[in-house]
Image (spheres, rainbow, N blue to C red):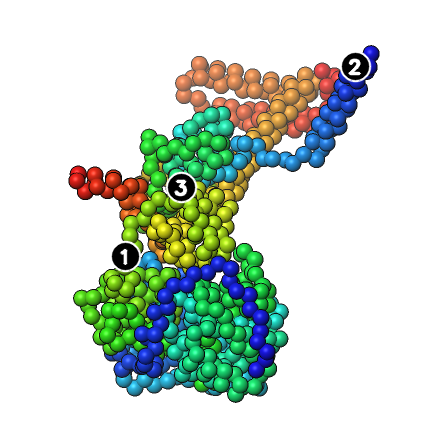
């Protein structure tokens, strides 16, 4: 092991009570295979998926069910073997409470795997490994479930690999339990990432106060004998496990607003993700299960479970012996960043790291919010160095432009500001709402800009059409006038025109005579009249043609003459 | 004498500086877009005419000349606020005589009823309706601004305005309303509230 590496402590952080011991009393447990699995087919934030199976299909464990339409790297696999009995919009653990596309799988009890061939990371190339990580549907298991393959593809000139074993939020112990029992597999996953990215160093950041996990990790790292891997113990505080915060603590590098660590050559991965990568590469297993902490004072037997994705939450709570009378709130995630769930009739999804069934005594309902007294405790607690009191004033006053100018988008929604607020103002809720309003506003602006371009084009096209029509009309009028002028100019000098006029007059006279003399003209007379008309017309046309030719050839002459 | 010469020198200096600066400003000065353009940039460009003007730009011109900023229902509260900030006015609530703010809707043509008259095609300010004479017309949803202008010209009333089905995309965290309502009170107010 290397010499103790330098750390950069977070200037702003909070120290909430950990509540971690209760769920670490027992080893990781498993549940009996549920009869029905409800597998969410989309990842949080994306709402459409391209289905790869139909209702009635028999599937094996690890078989592909759906692929994201927006993010093709986000895949969903069957968590057990059985029959797809339904594909429907069903409630899942999410913030909005809106149903999402899910596949309902009736398990056959055999739990039969469809494994991909296992790979040896020391012999295959990085592209094959990346393809495997994509095929296995691995997403970030510590946070928002962003597809690991997409993150790896976005990585530029890697120099540092950071492994996040901090798990700083109270109550959650899934990563700690994983490290205690399966540190060797986690380190195997780190080995795969090292092989893929070839960084100069790999830092594993773990909070102090996790001695068992640390010693297990040490043993595993020593066993793999890679001098690049280094374990760095950081002080326990919240939010030390935030990506940007951890990068700062371990390297002293601050990531600029709107940028990501991968753009600066730093890849940050959670230990759960590393474990999933090891399973995918070494055993050919898609991501179909995860470690979930089920804890809270309303449970008799809290603990960590390895559960299949799609397992009903209610069955998990049953195993933990939920006392329904004591239950006040059900939360997915931690108490600071998690979302409250309306009921337990929901499945476990890839991003469910923890469920808390809490009581009023353990996590009391916050008292009513009071006025902001501008004490500044929130800005002293903000790990993103924002001014929450200012942001709050602007968010409440719906001054969206100002919230953006005060860097609302840099808020990581960690909840530290609301935790320290002596007025109990739900600051993060305001910031989340303001972010939503702001993105709505930007979408509206973008739509308006787009519409303006189309409207201006529409106007220009209409104008052009009108101008063209006008131009044609003018041309026609000019031609007509030219003809008339030419005819008028050529008229007096042309014998033909006179002859034609005479013929016309004669024909007319003849017709009049015929009409007056005999109401019933004889056939000969009719023919004569018609002939005369034809002659007259011919003469007129000839005269006009000649006049036009003259007019074109010697207009000035004609003008002179006239 | 010395006083006069000093005044003269200063005058000449001031005049010279003024000429040079004005020429420089004319040559290199930043071209700030005209006020009408900046107002127009904030309007939603639906060209719906609910403000009483024949389009967004005429309304922008009218605002620049002093008309009220709260007559644009498609823009709603956010647009009024941006306009107020741009013009240094207090934001007003939306004038209800011009309509009320609604979710974004798009036109939908009931295609089996469409007779192919092209009247809606001509009415659409953003060319979002596709169709030819005696052929069925349809709306390009992504381009439709929901301005309603195609509804009136349709001789068979086969156009509906329906809200977009994007509830997942539309959803965002709500404001903590209940907390906000209580938050206005001080302790003694709460006593009054309890008694009332």
Q: In this view, does B13 lie to the left or right of B43?
A: right
Residue B3 - label: 2
On the image, the x and y values in percent for residue A360 come to 24, 61
Q: Residue at x 47, y 84 (%)?
A: A184
Q: In this view, does B156 lie above or below A3?
A: above
Q: Mark 3 lies on which chain?
A: A
Closer to us: B10 or A264: B10
Label 2 Cα neighbours within 10 Å, binned few <14 / some 14-19 / many ≥20: few
Calculate the distance from the C-alpha at mark 2 to the C-alpha at mark 1. 80 Å
Label 3 Cα neighbours within 10 Å, binned few <14 / some 14-19 / many ≥20: few
Query: Which numbered disc, 3 or 1, marks the residue that appears first in the sequence?
Result: 1
Reading the image, the residue beneath label 1 is A365
Closer to us: A492 or B29: B29
Closer to us: A202 or A213: A213
Calculate the distance from the C-alpha at mark 3 to the C-alpha at mark 2. 58 Å
Reading the image, the residue beneath label 3 is A397
Q: Which chain carries label 1?
A: A
Q: Which of the image's four quarters has the C terminus of chain A?
A: top right
On the image, the x and y values in percent for residue A76 come to 39, 72
Q: Which residue is drawn at 45% across and 31% down?
A: B89
Q: Is residue B79 above or below residue A426?
A: above
């Amino acid at each position: 092991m290397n010499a103790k590496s330098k750390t950069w402590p977070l200037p702003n952080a909070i120290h909430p009570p950990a509540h971690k011991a209760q769920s670490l009393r027992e080893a990781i447990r498993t549940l009996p295979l549920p009869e029905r699995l409800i597998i969410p087919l989309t990842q949080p934030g994306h709402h459409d998926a391209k289905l790869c199976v139909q209702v009635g299909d028999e599937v094996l464990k690890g078989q592909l069910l759906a692929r994201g339409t927006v993010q093709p790297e986000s895949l969903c696999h069957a968590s057990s073997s059985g029959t797809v009995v339904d594909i429907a919009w069903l409630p899942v653990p999410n913030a909005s409470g809106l149903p999402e596309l899910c596949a309902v799988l009736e398990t056959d009890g055999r739990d039969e795997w469809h494994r991909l061939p296992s790979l040896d990371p020391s012999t295959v190339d990085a592209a094959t490994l990346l393809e495997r990580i994509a095929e296995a549907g691995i997403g970030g298991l510590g946070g928002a479930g962003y597809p690991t393959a997409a993150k790896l593809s976005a990585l530029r000139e890697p120099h540092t690999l950071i492994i996040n074993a901090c798990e700083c939020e109270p109550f959650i112990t899934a990563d700690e339990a994983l490290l205690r029992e399966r540190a060797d597999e986690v380190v195997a996953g780190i080995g795969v990432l090292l092989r893929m990215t070839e960084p100069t160093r790999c830092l594993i950041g773990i909070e102090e106060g996790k001695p068992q996990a640390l010693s297990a990790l040490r043993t595993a790292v020593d066993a793999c004998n890679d001098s690049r891997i280094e374990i760095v113990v950081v002080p326990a505080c919240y939010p030390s496990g935030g990506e940007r915060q951890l990068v700062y603590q371990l390297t002293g590098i601050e990531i600029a607003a709107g940028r990501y660590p991968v753009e600066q050559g730093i890849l940050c991965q959670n230990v759960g993700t590393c474990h999933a990568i090891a399973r995918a590469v070494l055993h050919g297993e898609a991501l179909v299960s995860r470690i979930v902490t089920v804890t809270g004072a309303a449970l008799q037997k809290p603990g960590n479970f390895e559960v299949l994705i799609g397992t009903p939450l209610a069955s998990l709570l049953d195993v933990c012996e939920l006392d329904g009378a004591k239950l006040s709130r059900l939360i997915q995630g931690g108490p600071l960043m998690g979302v409250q769930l309306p009921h337990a009739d929901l499945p476990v999804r890839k991003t469910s790291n923890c469920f808390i069934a809490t009581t009023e005594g353990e996590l009391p309902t916050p008292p009513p919010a009071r006025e902001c007294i501008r004490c500044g405790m929130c800005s002293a607690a903000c790990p993103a160095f924002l001014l929450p009191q200012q942001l709050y004033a602007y968010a409440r006053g719906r001054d969206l432009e100002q919230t953006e100018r005060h860097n609302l988008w840099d808020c990581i929604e960690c909840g530290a500001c609301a935790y320290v607020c002596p007025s109990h103002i739900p600051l993060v809720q305001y910031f989340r709402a303001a972010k939503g309003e702001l993105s709505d506003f930007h979408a509206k602006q973008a739509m308006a800009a787009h519409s303006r371009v189309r409207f201006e084009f529409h106007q220009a096209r209409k104008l052009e059409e009108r101008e063209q029509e006008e131009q044609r009309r003018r041309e026609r009028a000019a031609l007509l006038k030219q003809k008339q002028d030419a005819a008028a100019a050529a008229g007096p000098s042309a014998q033909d025109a006179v002859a034609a006029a005479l013929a016309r007059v004669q024909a007319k006279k003849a017709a009049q005579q015929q009409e007056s003399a005999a109401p019933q003209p004889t056939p000969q007379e009719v023919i004569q009249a018609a002939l005369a008309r034809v002659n007259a017309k011919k003469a007129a046309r000839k005269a006009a043609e000649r006049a036009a030719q003259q007019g074109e050839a010697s207009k000035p002459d004609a003008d002179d003459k006239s | 004498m010395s006083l006069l010469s000093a005044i003269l020198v200063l005058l000449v200096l001031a005049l010279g500086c003024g000429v040079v600066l004005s020429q420089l400003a004319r040559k290199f000065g930043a071209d700030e877009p005209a006020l009408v353009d900046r107002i127009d940039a904030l309007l939603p460009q639906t060209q719906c005419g609910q403000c009483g003007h024949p389009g967004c730009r005429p309304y922008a011109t009218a605002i620049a000349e002093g008309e009220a900023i709260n007559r644009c229902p498609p823009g709603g509260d956010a647009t009024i606020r941006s306009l107020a900030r741009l013009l240094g006015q207090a934001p007003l609530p939306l004038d209800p005589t011009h309509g009320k703010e609604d979710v974004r809707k798009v036109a939908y043509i009931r295609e089996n009823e469409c007779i192919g008259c092209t009247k809606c095609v001509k009415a659409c300010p953003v060319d979002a309706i596709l169709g030819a004479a005696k052929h069925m017309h349809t709306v390009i949803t992504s381009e439709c601004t929901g301005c309603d202008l195609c509804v009136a010209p349709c001789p068979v009333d086969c156009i509906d305005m329906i809200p977009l089905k994007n509830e997942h995309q539309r959803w965002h965290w709500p404001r903590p309303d209940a907390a906000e309502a209580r938050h206005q009170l001080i302790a003694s107010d709460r006593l009054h509230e309890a008694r009332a």
